[in-house]
Image (cartoon, coloured by chain):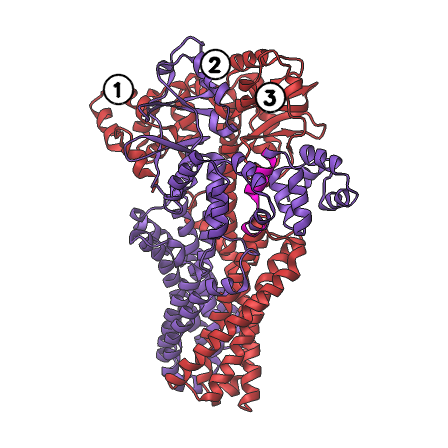
Chain colours: A purple, B red
């Protein structure tokens, strides 16, 4: 979608053009075009479609920085292929240019023998830092943080601070907020904006913000990302348990974390065990493994519905047309329940709803359910009469069943995610698949209880 | 969740404490605490729970800038209440401090008489700009962009550029990338990092990046947000159809756009018409209106299932236990279909999957479906035998039906979102509710076709 105008504004450097230049051995031309007309994230994408030989040739044409960045955007299969084709000195260059957080990401996905080779290509100081970062738990702030940031002292003047930024450099996000430390402890922060718009002779101490937000290395990466979104930050400082500054999480990493976590939530809501890999990056067997547990559980749960129906076998033998209404009733109930559960699950995720709101939510859903059930029952009653699927008694019976089903579905649908949150489960597991199975059971029970009373079966 | 440590690191300024200070008339103390210990986004949240009189009192204690920012974070009901309580001159101050993009957001949600009063409180130049912004279509880049940014000329030196930033100031995100324009046309961009780390006598022309990303005012805000995420940008310049620079979209706005769009996708996937309001901000009637269309459509679609079942009424009269398997079969089919459709819908949203991949996706899903159906059929067959719900023939029949159902469900589930994308519909409408209704119909058809053949009914 967004590709349209990204392409339009660049001189086309498509995969075909790259392959053509390679074939014609126009390496100088290709090298130039790669430098001027290609973003690393796009190149990584293109290289995935290339054969190993061509991929390595293109990679070797890249400037050091671009090579490191492109490498960071590759998927793990492609990275492994590439590592096995590079010489030790080439590998050293890539490892040298890569940011530490990217290096750690790469290492976490590689087989042991590749990790060994990568660590060999890294200097000792960096290796020490990598080992520290690898110790943070998955999904913690420590595991996604960047250890490069600008640290200032409170006795510095603004002019000295700007000089320090000049010397240290680093990449963009990491310089826009500077952190003031004293014996490694975080005591304040200064925006570069502040530095640029204040008199050069002022002391950092005078202009620094001392009441700032921060997170701990062990905090959940999702919480950190939400804080960055909520307060519109460029970066959030990360401290250890003694308030010593150890790194920052930048807004671009936060956006990727939120995107990953949303994908995870959506997968869980569809009854799929989430994976960090992409759809195509996951093998058939892994897909089966991640989907089958819920399917098995839900299929076996449906045994309850079946047992209830079997106990009404004689009623069905007398009035077989009763069965025809079942898919409509369970379908409507399931859909009503999933509407409520989905809205509540999302409300919890974006922190609009919390467990304390449970009564407010139920009261809202009950009123919604009453209005919806009235409308649907009437429409369905008319349909039954018009299509000659039953008389007024049948229309009324189905109407009452439907009303009960909708109210039960909405209440169950909105309550379960809240309860899950309260007891420390992920609310997303209370989405459609589970709700619709529970609603099936209650719908069938209510239906047969009502019809057997009305028709004296 | 993230609240935990946000609270921990601030001296507690809770709603109780604010109310207490108000009651004790300790206005000076309260004013100070509000200034030092409160973020506007949090205060807006707290004020929602206050009575009008107290809310207005607290608001009047805020410094101009904080007041404007807090106002921008309030929900529309609270804003209207506040506007009606402020004097004209107070309102003028707020309007003066607010960023233009926030002002436009506020205006779009207010009733006409309030809009009139707000525009009266705005100076003429700003009113002209507001009117321009209001003309961009909803959800376009123009409607979310910020018109404050730093424009440089290519003849400037780095020192002059830094001087210009000092003079213009503006807020954080808007200064970190500066844009080079010539007769209003965008011709390059310079990172503040570049300015800070280069010799002061260099010309902007020498250091500017000329091959940069941009978007047009009419581009979809979601595409703009994705570009900012994908390329890790702080801001993206927005140009009109003549390449004249008109504004920027900053990363903090991009994060909010992505969050909104995700909520919208998730709502649509649950068969709920999306709304821009929050769960509690939507009235019961509005909730009913946004949920009932799909419920009605799906309920009436279930008529097809019912007609198929009615045509097998005699079979059901002979073997009423056949009905008992229906919820399990349709449930499993629905869950299988929604797993596939959800993963494909998300893959489309994050731009991993596109229509051209359709055969690759179907082939993957077919293999997954075959493995899953083999496993589930065997488990279910064992269950049927163990629980005495049927003989080997019955177990075999249900197994074959289940296998067919799962394969159909997975293929339909993965195909429909791709087709929707191709024909320009939102793939999210092809989620669980619609898929499960379609799967119900095919499951019932297959089931009765098979059982009537096997049992000669």
The residue segment tinted magenta is A65-78
Q: Magenta span: helix, strand or loop, mainly? A: helix
**Residue B338 shows which numbered tag?**
none
Q: CA distance from mark 3 to mark 2?
A: 29 Å
Residue beneath disc 2: A197
Q: Residue at x 49, y 77 (%)?
A: A324
Residue at position x 47%, y 16% in the image? A162
SS label for mark 2 = loop
Q: Quadrant of residue A303?
A: bottom left
- B98 w.r.t. A232: above or below: above
- Residue A395 falls inside the magenta stretch: no
Chain holding disc 2: A
Label 2 and label 1: CA atoms lie apart by 32 Å
- Image location of residue B22, percent across then percent down: 24, 25
What chain is tagged by disc 1? B
A69 magenta-colored: yes
Disc number placed over residue B27 in the picture, else none: 1
């Amino acid at each position: 979608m967004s590709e349209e105008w990204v392409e339009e504004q660049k001189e086309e450097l498509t995969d075909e053009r790259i392959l053509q230049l390679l074939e014609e051995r126009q390496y100088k031309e290709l090298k130039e075009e790669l430098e001027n007309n290609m973003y690393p994230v796009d190149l990584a994408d293109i290289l995935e479609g290339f054969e190993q030989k061509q991929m390595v040739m293109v990679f070797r044409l890249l400037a050091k920085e671009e090579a490191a960045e492109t490498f960071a955007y590759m998927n793990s299969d492609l990275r492994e292929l590439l590592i096995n084709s590079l010489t030790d000195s080439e590998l050293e260059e890539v490892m040298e240019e890569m940011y530490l957080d990217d290096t750690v990401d790469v290492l976490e996905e590689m087989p042991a023998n590749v990790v060994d080779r990568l660590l060999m290509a890294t200097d000792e100081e960096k290796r020490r830092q990598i080992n520290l970062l690898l110790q943070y738990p998955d999904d913690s702030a420590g595991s996604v943080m960047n250890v490069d940031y600008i640290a200032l002292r409170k006795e510095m003047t603004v002019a000295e601070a700007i000089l320090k930024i000049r010397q240290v450099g680093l990449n963009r996000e990491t310089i826009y907020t500077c952190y003031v430390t004293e014996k490694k402890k975080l005591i304040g922060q200064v925006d570069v904006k502040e530095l640029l718009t204040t008199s050069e002779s002022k002391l950092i101490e005078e202009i620094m913000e001392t009441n700032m937000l921060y997170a701990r290395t062990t905090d959940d990466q999702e919480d950190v990302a939400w804080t960055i979104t909520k307060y519109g930050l460029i970066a959030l400082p990360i401290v250890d348990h003694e308030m010593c500054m150890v790194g920052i999480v930048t807004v671009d990493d936060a956006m990727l974390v939120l995107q990953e976590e949303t994908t995870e939530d959506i997968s869980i809501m569809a009854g799929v065990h989430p994976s960090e890999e992409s759809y195509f990056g996951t093998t058939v067997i892994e897909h089966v493994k991640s989907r089958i547990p819920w399917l098995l559980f839900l299929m076996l749960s449906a045994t309850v519905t079946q047992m209830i129906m079997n106990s009404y076998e004689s009623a069905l033998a007398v009035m077989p047309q009763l069965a025809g209404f079942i898919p409509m009733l369970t379908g409507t109930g399931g859909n009503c329940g999933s509407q409520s559960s989905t809205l509540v699950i999302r409300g919890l995720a974006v922190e609009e709803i919390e467990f304390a709101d449970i009564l407010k939510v139920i009261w809202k859903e009950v009123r919604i359910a009453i209005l919806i059930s009235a409308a649907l029952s009437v429409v369905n009653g008319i349909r039954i009469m018009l299509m000659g699927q039953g008389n007024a008694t049948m229309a009324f019976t189905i109407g009452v069943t439907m009303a009960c089903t909708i109210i039960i579905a909405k209440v169950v649908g909105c309550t379960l995610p809240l309860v899950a949150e309260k007891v420390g489960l992920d609310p997303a597991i209370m989405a459609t698949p589970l709700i619709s199975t529970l609603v099936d059971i209650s719908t069938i029970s209510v239906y047969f209880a009502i019809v057997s009373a009305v028709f004296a079966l």
